[in-house]
Amino acid sequence: GQQVMQIPQYQHVQEGEDFTTYCNSSTTLSNIQWYKQRPGGHPVFLIQLVKSGEVKKQKRLTFQFGEAKKNSSLHITATQTTDVGTYFCAGYPTDSWGKFQFGAGTQVVVTP
Amino acid sequence: DADVTQTPRNRITKTGKRIMLECSQTKGHDRMYWYRQDPGLGLRLIYYSFDVKDINKGEISDGYSVSRQAQAKFSLSLESAIPNQTALYFCATSGPRGGRGYYTDTQYFGPGTRLTVL
């Protein structure tokens, strides 16, 4: 079964609002990656976090990797219509090198 | 990413038919992956290959086989297609930046193949 869980599955956001999507793994991950898939498109890499407790920012996006390397979050501030899409987290367990597991994704819909 | 191509882009086939999906990359990466995407399930790993002689089963390999013909080519086969293999299939690659140097796990996805099995 799926070992990397993402919540929420859907996120309706008013333009200008903030939201957070969460990723939780049942196993310790070597690293965590985040991807964005626009409707009709393919997943595109956003960022990778490697260290325990790491926080990285990309403009309005803030990514965090948990201390135990089992969870992660993506926070978007002042949501824009360009943020529409599905956001996936992905990683592989420390004992299964390269065997990537993706979360089911958070589909984001932005209302103007 | 234009450096990763998949053929065909769309395919409709019938139950029991053999079908091959092809993936080629010009990124010089050694690692290649096949995923399927279903609504609500995200991407699930079918097979992955670290080089031409190293092929590994992913989470859902039953009913699929792969061939790594060269570093740049990785094919996925459905020996006898069934309707629940209807899905969007993605190929991805990862490897050193620019084909050499520092290695990264970043995956670069192809445009996908939409497969329908009737």
Image (cartoon, rainbow, N blue to C red):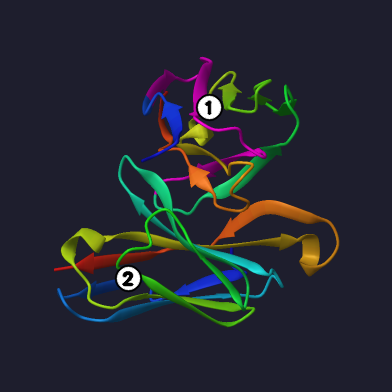
Horizontally, residue A76 falls left or right of residue B111, namely: right
Circle 1: element type: loop
Q: Nearer the observer, disc 1 or disc 2? A: 2
Q: Which corner quadrant holds the C terminus of chain A?
A: top left
- A37 lies left or right of B18: right
Where residue A101 appears, as percent x and y from the top left, is 50, 45
Q: Residues within 10 Å of mark 1 (few under 14, many from 20)?
A: some
- Residue A42 appearing in the image: yes
Specify the amino acid type for callout 2. Asn
Is A20 colored magenta in this rendering?
A: yes
Image coords of residue B17 (percent x, y): 20, 80
* Residue B28 versus residue A63 in the image, above or below: below
Residue reaching furthest right? B101
Answer yes or no: do the residues labelled 1 and 2 have beta carbons within 8 Å? Answer: no
Q: Is residue B98 left or right of residue A68?
A: right
Q: CA distance from mark 1 to mark 2?
A: 32 Å
Image vertical order of residue B14 relative to residue A66, above or below: below
- Viewer-proximal residue, B70 or B10? B70
Pointer 2 indicates a residue of which chain? Answer: B
- At x 74% / y 25%, what residue is drawn? A54
Region of the chain picked out in magenta, as a range: A11-39
Foreground of the two, B64 or A94: A94
- Quadrant that contains the N terminus of chain A: top left
Subunit of label 1: A
Question: Which residue is the site of mark 1?
Answer: A80
Q: Is residue B96 magenta?
A: no
Which secondary structure lies at badge 2? strand
Amino acid type of the residue tagged 1 in the rendering: Gln
Badge 2 is on which residue? Answer: B10
